[in-house]
Structures are given as C-alpha cells and as structure tokens.
Image (cartoon, grey):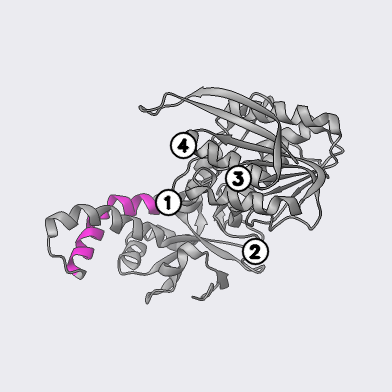
Amino acid sequence: MNSFYSVTNIGELYVPAECREAVFARARVKLFARQELGHLNRIFTHIRQGGVAVTEGKWEQITTLMDYIQRHKQDLIQHADRSAKRRDRRDSHGRSASLALREALAKLMCWVDADGILQAESAPVIPHLLELAGEPAGANEGKPFLLPVTKIQQIQQALADTYPIHALDASVVASENVLAPRSQETIECFQDALQFVRQSNPATVADIGCGSGCLTLLARQELGEQVELYASDLLPEAVATTKLNIQRLLPHSDTIYIMPAGDLFDPLPPHQFDVIIFNAPWVVARVRNRAELAIHDEKQETVKRFFAQVSNFLKPNGTILFGYADASGPKAIDNLEGIIAEAGFRENAIFKRRVATHRSKRKWEQIRVYVLNQK
C-alpha cells in the first residue's frame, strides 16, 4: 500500500501505517480549515459517509468536533446497521456501538508540517511526534504527515504523567507503549551493578531496549560524563521518549547517542563496547500488542537472540548487565541460566530484590541483575 497521499490545498502527506486503511479506502479525504471547523454537522456527515476529515485551525475547535462525534454516536450506529447485513442485530448492536465510534474518530485527523508542528493553534507542542506515533524517524521523507486526533491526545495524555526515580532524584516521562519505570527495585539493582563495574573504568556503554531512557540516565550518573553512551530500542516511541528525557535532564550532554529504532543490536555502530545493558522482557508469554514488547518474550526467543549476537558487540573483557525477573517461575530462570552458560558467559555477580506482586497465585517475585563476563 502507498504511504503518501495528496490532499488539496496541502500537497503530498505521509500517512502512518495505522491510518492507511482509512485514508486509502474508497472515500474522500478533505481538508476542513479554520472557519470550516465550525460546521460540525457537515464534517460529521462527511465522516459518517466514510470520508476522512483533515483538520487545520484552533485546537479547541478540533477537540469540540471530537466531542460532537461522540455525542452523536447513535447516528453512526444506525448508519452502520443500515449498511451492514447482520444475522443477529441485537447481539451485533452492542459491539457495533464502540466499533462505529472508534472508526469514525480514526477518520478525524490533523496534519503536521515537515518540522513536526501540528497545524492547530494553541495545540500541545510535542517534539518527535512522528516517532511517538510509532513511526521511524525520517519515514515521512521530509514531508508533512497525518495523525488521528485521538492518537495525538493519547500521546499528550501519556506524556502528562511523570515517574519519580529515587536513584536519579528526578522524574521521567514514558509515552504510549513505552514501559513506565515504576519498579524502583529494578533500578536499584542496576545501580548496584553499575557501581560494581565502575571500578573497571568503562569507556563505551550500550543500553539495549532503552525504553524511557531511565538506565541510560543512570549509567551516565554512575559511570561519569566521560563515558560514551549508546541507547537503542525496537520501538520508535521508546527512542523518542529517551530523547525527551535526555533533553529534559541532560540538555547539554554530547556523549549520549540515541540511535534510530531497530531490533537489538541492529541500530548500533559496528564497534565493541565495554558494558552492554539489557533489561530483558521477563514474562514468557506471547506478545499481543506493542506495549507488551518490553515485557513478554514468547519461548524466551528475544533472550536467545540477544545472547547469540552479544559477543560480536562486546569487548573480550567486557561486561553484560542483564536484568530479569522470575515472574514466569523457576523453569524460566533455569532456561535463562542455561542460555547464558551456552553462550559462553559466567556470573561475576548478581544483585537481587524481592518485590510483592498483585497476582493471587504468586505474592512475591525476585528481580535480579546479572553481571556477566565471558568465560
């Protein structure tokens, strides 16, 4: 499917993957700008008939339009019922209510210029907006792009929350789909591990799966400003979140390099590191959505791939700081330690914390950070 679409009075725009089905359907994509935003019923009718409404103007008017669509969801349901054939109307009606509203709201979009500025007056200023929406940096090829208004609001709401990190004496943000650093115990274990390796005077450090950037910030604090730090993550929204937190807390740092989004070691430069940090996904389960990528690891495949590749990026006397938890039970830990040994690594130290869980079958779990060296 094409990823660019031309809209009258704007020109060619990049369409993020999650918007393409709506934009490239057999329906009109129309710009409603400024004074036109006051014609709520006209825009609603356009969307109800399958069209996509691209908005430009006052942010307050755009959000008022969202409220209007939500208040008139019954009209969306009736329209859907008339146009669809259902065997059991009573059963399908309940399901179609939320579906029809969700589909309608997905067709209400705002356009963003090539510099990432929302074309909405008094709108929230959100840096790295395309990445926070889950798209790789540069995917728009320097052109404007579209985003659903609901997506913009979700990002805005996620970034409104902050998470205090006791070890840093600071708070960080975590965008949508990014693992929020709520576990002080995990951070404390990594702090202990970083202090343990500090004596070896590491010069280069990689933080794989950087998420919010919390461990990158911690490594800077514990290892010093002279250390070159490289941060990477699979999710563009995690890369963007790390950028935001580094810019907020270390605005003048010139030895932290945040890499483009990519799997494990793919984004890193082709050289070897003194220390590699990886807070691995610790729940042995299938990934059902983007938010679970940092937590779930079906059959421990991510862990296996990490240890299959890590020697290529680690100096012969280098160290891995590997975070894990026994949330999936002792068998998962046994498997993990077997993977570590098979990859040719040994435990130099291990730092642990016991934490309470909210699961009925298991009230406690152990968080651990392994300090690993090659045998």
Q: Is residue 55 left or right of residue 262?
A: left
- What amino acid does circle 1 point to? Arg
Q: Which residue is mark 4?
A: 328
Q: Which residue is mark 2?
A: 114
Label 1–label 2 contact, CB within 8 A? no
Q: Nearer the viewer, mark 3 or mark 1?
A: 3
Dot 3: within a 10 Å radius of its alpha carbon, few (fewer than 14), some, or many (20 or more) residues? Answer: some
- What amino acid does circle 3 point to? Ile
Q: Earlier in the sequence, mark 4 or mark 2?
A: 2
Quadrant for the C terminus, please: top right
| Residue 178 point in image, percent of width and height | 55, 44
- What amino acid does circle 4 point to? Ser
On residue 339, the disc is: 3
| Residue 107 point in image, percent of width and height | 40, 62
Q: Earlier in the sequence, mark 3 or mark 1?
A: 1
On residue 288, the disc is: 1
